[in-house]
């Protein structure tokens, strides 16, 4: 039986997002590699990571290559699309759909962006301005 594809009804949980971050950053990994990266210091068992990843596979959040003895998992959903989905939902729920209000709130209430981050923000603003704004 093949896993279902991730759909709009399957939002990753906090624990699942942790696993996805490892897979997005490192690429395909075994359960042991994910466990060692996320849980080695807090004592969570290997079987906890295995069960989470099996559930994620069923949801379509990860894909599994079981051609080898140690199954290798990779993210089944795109990082950028997932980030956009969460941000869009947050803007809709908390800021009446205004992404600009969300950004202003985030920057105004959480100072401490590095010079490099501020330069990236300025470059993005310049690009948006040069393109005549976004619709």
Image: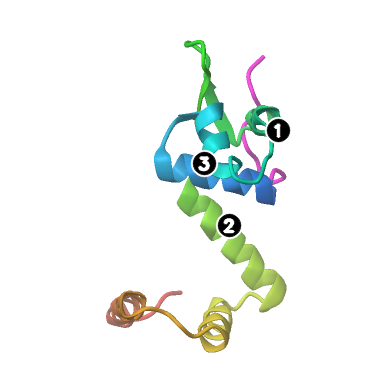
- Give the SS element for disc 3: helix
Mark yes or no: residue 85 visible: yes
Q: Which residue is mark 3?
A: 37
Instruction: Tell me if residue 4 comes above or below residue 39 in the rendering.
Output: above
Of the 4 image quadrants, the one containing the N terminus is top right
Q: Which residue is mark 2?
A: 85
Q: Residues within 10 Å of mark 2 (few under 14, many from 20)?
A: some
- The residue furthest bottom is 108
Tell me which secondary structure the magenta stretch mostly adopts. loop
Which of the 4 image quarters holds residue 61?
top right
Residue 67 at x, y percent in the picture = 48, 10
Q: Which residue is mark 1?
A: 48
Please give the name of the residue rendered at 65% of the width and 29% of the height, measured from the top-left corner: 46
- Which region is colored magenta? 1-10
Marks 1 & 2, CB-CB < 8 Å contact: no
Residue 84 at x, y percent in the picture = 53, 59
Q: Residues within 10 Å of mark 1 (few under 14, many from 20)?
A: few
Mark yes or no: residue 76 visible: no
Instruction: Tell me if residue 49 comes above or below residue 38 in the rendering.
Output: above
Frontmost of labels 1 and 2 is 1
* Disc nearer the start of the sequence (2/3): 3
Instruction: Tell me if residue 38 comes above or below residue 74 in the rendering.
Output: below
């Amino acid at each position: 039986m093949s896993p279902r594809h991730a759909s709009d009804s399957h939002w990753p949980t906090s624990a699942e997002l942790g696993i996805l971050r490892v897979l997005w950053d490192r690429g395909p990994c075994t359960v042991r590699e994910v466990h060692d990266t996320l849980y080695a210091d807090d004592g969570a068992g290997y079987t906890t990571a295995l069960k989470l990843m099996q559930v994620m596979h069923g949801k379509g959040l990860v894909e599994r290559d079981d051609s080898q003895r140690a199954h290798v998992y990779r993210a089944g959903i795109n990082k950028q699309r997932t980030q956009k989905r969460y941000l869009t939902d947050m803007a809709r729920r908390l800021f009446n759909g205004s992404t600009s209000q969300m950004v202003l709130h985030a920057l105004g209430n959480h100072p401490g962006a590095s010079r490099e981050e501020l330069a990236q923000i300025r470059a993005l603003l310049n690009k948006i301005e040069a393109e005549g704004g976004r619709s």
